[in-house]
Amino acid sequence: MRKAAPWLLAIALLVACISPAVATIYGTLTIKQIQDPGTAPNPVGVPNPAGSAAGDTVGPVYGIITCFDTFPSGFAFYLQNNPGGPWTGIDVFTGGANTASTLGLQVRDSVAVTGALAEFSTGSAPCNPADGGTEIIAKNGSFGTDLTITKISSGRPLPPFHIGTAAELKELCTNANAEQWEGCLVRLNGPLKIGRTNFTGGLGTFRSALVTLSSCAGPVCDSVFIDLSTLANPAVDPGTVGQTIDFVQGAYDQRARGYRIQIRDGNDYGIQAPPNVARGYAIGPQKYRIEMDRDVTQASAEDESNYTIASIAGPPNLATLEADGSHIDLDVTTPLTPGGTETVSVTGLVGLSSNLPMTTLQNASFHAGILTAAQVQAPNPDSLSATPCSDVSKLGDGLPVTISAICTAQFGTSYYLSSSNSQRDGITVFAPPADLNPGERYMIAGGVLEFFGETEMGGTGAQIVYVQDQGAAAIPAPVTQTIAVLNDATCDFPEPGFGTSTHQTTGEDFEGMLVHVNNVLCTEDRAAGQSFFVTTYPPSADTILVSLSTSVTFTFQAARTKVLNVTGILRFSNGTFRIAPRSDADIVQVTASAGNNIPGQVTFSAFPNPARTTRVAFGLPRRDDVELAVYDAQGRKVAVIAKGVYEPGSYTEEWNGRNSSGDLARAGMYFYRLRVGKEILNLRAVKLD
């Protein structure tokens, strides 16, 4: 996963602890059969349902989606069966895959899931570190991809909330009554009072609160932990100590401190308080959106006098409450140029459930207008002129930015967008709430940060908050450049626009863009699908890594004899630039020299014969798909020594006598098979020890 570095803390907390027992494979099971130790055939029992290093495999497991975890530190959703009741809920952890977007899943969808069982670690004593919330995860690991999810139907009724007591739902991991409601929708009715919040310290969650029954007058009261950020996006303000709450509801689960209720949005937290402004951002050249942390009344939301636009020192032209009840769109006429800082002040909005109005002014600041990727990539002049020089975005101040650009590539949860092949016009977008398809234009709002030197939107503290598909668009043509330029990570001051023409073109000018290099030579032999370095042809000191993403299936095999044309996204990681092809089609083998004659038909020969190392030559009259493989006398494939799309010309490859596992093959007769398109040629040669 590309995001492993910023997730180190999250992964440490979210690691699935699995016991060393032998794994078992089960077929169709109900959630109750997985969760309830008293329901046969409970596969692994509690309190530690994990069966082995890979976990017991279960599925398909059927259920109704009740809510999503949409944060990029680890996507997930909750399943529950109707008509509810104990042992009927479970968490499905999808890791780096945002299934809400990739599969188009929604709350109330009925799905079938096949994966492995694991326990979400509860941390340290007094909780048992190996005993936590039961999850279905990928069979090849918590952040793996081997998880099967099939949508069956939509619009199913949600299971009813279990109405629990404070004693039943208290957070202690020793609470014997809580385990049966893990993964289920629960509700705690009040009146309740807030005893502690994350702002008073000691809770360890971004937004959280401990609540007790208001009627509890003793020195010790049952405390229920309320998680206001894991499932809620935006996170909800916990309120203040002593404040009254009518009810709280959400998905119940076991986490780092013990058991908790995870609210899904502000409407699950019945606090007796006015609504709050969550954030704002541009959704058009002269259109802003304000998000509230809970539903508000239509009359208050659409009263333009409740808003003040800083750039015009007055109200918007029109305010419209969206159907979801918490988003308000503002039509404005502002003199700000795209990228200028805007602030919208809000007051007077009334909570739909509490009926309480805002009494204090709250602000949402963001960058106005719709920007290009190049405008986001433009460097901060203060950082450029600093010592040491640093080439970072001038918009990386934490405020939401809105861009319009074309998706050019996808690698896992990282997407690359551009609008042209002009310099600086590339940007990374990490973990958007909806999948982006190459060849589509999108309007996207989110924060900007530098991920180990690569400018991107999204990620921790800069989450993508808005995506609008604007339709099909042509992907910009790749920019042809030299290895020397693309691998130059020099921080170049001054940049264009700073009153000078002495700017040096470097890799930073093409970061995140589609680039192309011609006639480059592999510098090493690698196994199929592995990354490799290339240099100029003829060779020079200039090299660059061709990075084959593990999220894409590659069959190309690098060899020191291959001269290539390579296309891909210029990415930056660990202090260096690298070219990331989108597929095998981005790696094309070309003729070894400009003067190479093109044969009139396919040619094929092996020499010397016999030999310890055999050289195989072939010629192509046309561009075609090629595979050159070695077979033993029993017809078993021993090794693939050439594979991919080749341009017309003559080529020479070597077989070093090793099989696909790297072991030295025995001496004897071997057969060489060349496939060019649908044409197949065979010859044989003797290998010596």
Image (tube, helix red, strand yellow):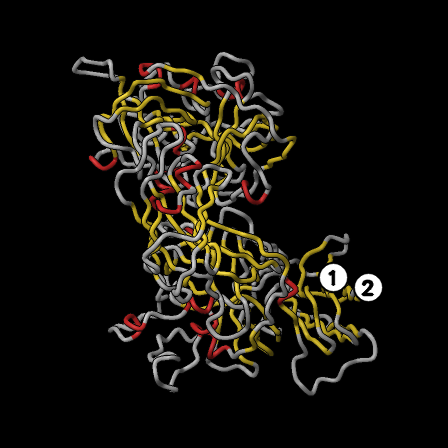
Q: Nearer the viewer, residue 301 or 591?
A: 301
The image shows residue 293 at horizontal and vertical percentages of 37, 38
- Identify the disc placed on residue 670: 1
Q: Residue at x 54, y 80 (%)?
A: 536
- Does dot 1 land on a helix, a strand or a loop? strand
Q: Amino acid at mark 2?
A: Ile
- Does dot 2 land on a helix, a strand or a loop? strand
**Category of crowding for the residue at label 2, using alpha-carbon neighbours closer than 10 angstroms: few (below 14), some (14–19), many (at least 20):** few
Mark 1 or 2: in front is: 2
Q: Amino acid at mark 1?
A: Tyr
The picture quadrant where one finds residue 366 is: bottom left
The image shows residue 636 at horizontal and vertical percentages of 73, 52
Q: Which residue is mark 2?
A: 680
- Identify the disc placed on residue 253: none
Whole-angstrom CA distance, mark 1 to mark 2, is: 16 Å
Q: Quadrant of the C terminus?
A: bottom right
Give the vertical position of 398 relative to 371 (above or below).
above
Q: Nearer the viewer, residue 64 or 265?
A: 265
Q: Nearer the viewer, residue 503 or 642?
A: 503
The image shows residue 81 at horizontal and vertical percentages of 55, 21
The image shows residue 207 at horizontal and vertical percentages of 31, 37
Q: Nearer the viewer, residue 145 or 496?
A: 496
Q: Is residue 464 shown to the viewer in this render?
A: no
- Earlier-in-chain disc, 1 versus 2: 1
**Category of crowding for the residue at label 1, using alpha-carbon neighbours closer than 10 angstroms: few (below 14), some (14–19), many (at least 20):** some
